[in-house]
Image (tube, grey):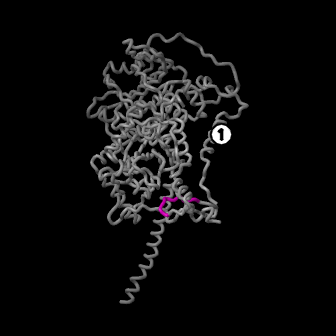
Amino acid sequence: MYVAVKGGERAIDNAHAWLAEERRGDPGVGELTVPQIREQLSLAVNRVMAEGSLYDPDLAALAIKQARGDMIEAIFLIRAYRTTLPRIGHAKPVDTGAMACDRRISATFKDVPGGQVLGPTFDYTHRLIDFALAAEGEAPRSEQADPLPGTMPRVTEYLNLDGLIQPEAPSDDTPPDMTRQPMEFPAGRSLRLQALTRGDEGFVLGMAYSTQRGYAKNHPFVGELRIGTVAVEIDIPELGFAVEIGEVVLTECETVNQFTGSKTEPAQFTRGYGLVFGQSERKAISMALVDRALRWAELGEDNLGAPAQDEEFVLSHADNIQATGFLEHIKLPHYVDFQSELELVRRLRAEAQQAGTSAESGGTAPQSVEAAE
Amino acid sequence: MSAYNFAYLDEQTKRMIRRALLKAIAIPGYQVPFASREMPMPYGWGTGGVQVTAACLTPEDRLKVIDQGADDTTNAISIRKFFETTAGVETTERTGEATVIQTRHRIPEAPLGDDQILVYQVPIPEPLRFLEPRETETRRMHALEEYGLMHVKLYEDIARHGAIATSYAYPVKVEGRYVMDPSPIPKFDNPKLESAAIQLFGAGREQRIYAIPPHTRVVSLDFEDHPFVASKADHACDLCGAEQSYLDEVIVDDAGGRMFVCSDTDFCATRQAEGHRGRFSPEAAE
């Protein structure tokens, strides 16, 4: 006879135990260490830090290990941890102009002061599986040059000198904090950039790609892409001055976009901006393209109804933690709702059937009336 | 878990949520934006309800958590465990003994009292969302009390199907002002929205909190010639014989045999303990 299903608690405990065993995999194979992940899967670590909105390579590596390599799950672990951390202060805006660059390229000029520096990039590798990597070998070494002297000037500043590029208005306003205030629309650029930098890489990439394919096309060039280390400074009220508390690696992308002018703006180049934790080039470029597409109103462009121009659409769907949670929640029991739907469908079908039969009998009735007449 | 504050959230966050709750109580049915936090369970799995519960709990509270009316569904167990660990509060499966009840998709059958708080988990707080996807638009519609679109939708249902084809998350009007989504409870539960208890609704992902204060008028939308009917399966519970409780349909064999049982497990167990019997009760079957 039927008894209500009990023992959910034991099932959950057993599922967790099995999950832990699966995470470890074959115990005959050596266990991954957190430093191994941090050092050898560093681009995965970067993505987890960027979308987790927390700069901590060790913690991100641990999250990747715990999540069995599921990036969104790892990002989720970092986000959930991040919310529990107290706010001890706010950093001063980081100066990416003073970045110690590992990589810095411009697609708009053949050469620029400071030079084109390729850095550690996949760009010109041939994507051939390197079977030698399957065997353990000596750690590869690359040739070392002297550190780059001084700071790299910004490429877009050269355009700015001639007034050829739209200037960015400086502001000392305290930016809004999307992790402490509910999102409201219109969000404004500052909030948009916050949402984009922690947005899902795949989603932001797809949105950016759609603008390249003609949905609100805005002809971007990578004015400059730079990756490197910047200092983080924080004002210490007791001391009365700012103290450097550490360094972070950032990827910054400024796009230069063709712009023939609008009702409000003269013909000039315009900008899109991307800034992401770690070496995250694809994300930074994507972010810059989407940022530019979302600026249509400010630049007096037409709203073409393209998805990437729609702030509410982009910002409401960019967060993979929100998206995956809501998507996956349909695995949860819904049998109460399903039951009410079952009853509704049954009733509608019964009524339709009844109406069908009465329509048929109704069809014969007038005939008999006619016959009677 | 001593590294975390009582009921997980820090006091600053709780204060922010309590402010939103007070505002929600003051404007029945109005969706108050709040800075929802990332919780250690996924969005869509009750993060809004969990935050509201966390902000309401005191160490003296007795908590009950149900999902689909049952205390033993996996997610209900998971949330109950979360508060057992982070708040150390007493928990119960008895509706009458609980001071705070967090629920997903049901209102308990037993009437609630004025010393109880019912916390709903809400996936989509906006009743107009499926008619208008833009938040900027729907907020304006609420502000102007512009609910014509909803009535047109219900009317179209009648024109097409002969009945209003909404069986759960059936929209209500609260205290004659705001149209509100009661969360995906079956419409059978709608009459119970007029209650002596405080009813709080939390939508974590959508960052909204709303409320129905005790004894507030809650009217399910309908038309004079098509009045609202709180329907349920036309059966009695096969375990406790109850005729006025919401039923789950359970497939019991591979020949399509089925039985109906109360979705509210505490209600059913209480009735069985009182000696009520249904068609398939072990004793009745003998």
**In which quadrant will I find the C terminus of chain A?**
bottom left
Few, some or many residues within 10 Å of mark 1 (<14, 14–19, 20+) = few
* Residue A214, position as x, y percentages in the image: 41, 39
Amino acid type of the residue that numbered disc 1 sits on in the rendered structure? Trp
| Residue B248 colored in magenta in the image | yes
Residue at the right extreme of this rendering: A28
From the viewer's side, name the closer residue of B181 and B133: B181
* Residue B91, position as x, y percentages in the image: 52, 43
Residue drawn at 53 percent across, 58 percent down: B271
Q: Which residue corresponds to mark 1?
A: A18
Q: Is residue B180 visible?
A: yes
From the viewer's side, name the closer residue of A105 and B182: B182
* Residue A217, position as x, y percentages in the image: 39, 36
Residue A192 placement: quadrant: top left
Residue at the bottom extreme of this rendering: A372
Placement of B264 over or under A41, stated as above or below: below
Question: Which range of residues does the magenta coloring cover?
Answer: B243-250
Q: How many marks?
A: 1
Q: Chain of mark 1?
A: A
Placement of A251 over or under A289, stated as above or below: above
Q: Is residue B123 visible?
A: no
Residue at the front extreme of this rendering: B274
From the viewer's side, name the closer residue of A95 and B99: B99
Q: Secondary structure at mark 1?
A: helix
Placement of B240 over or under B58, stated as above or below: below
Residue A253 placement: quadrant: top left
| Residue A100 colored in magenta in the image | no
Residue A239 placement: quadrant: top left
* Residue B46, position as x, y percentages in the image: 48, 43
From the viewer's side, name the closer residue of B120 and B35: B120
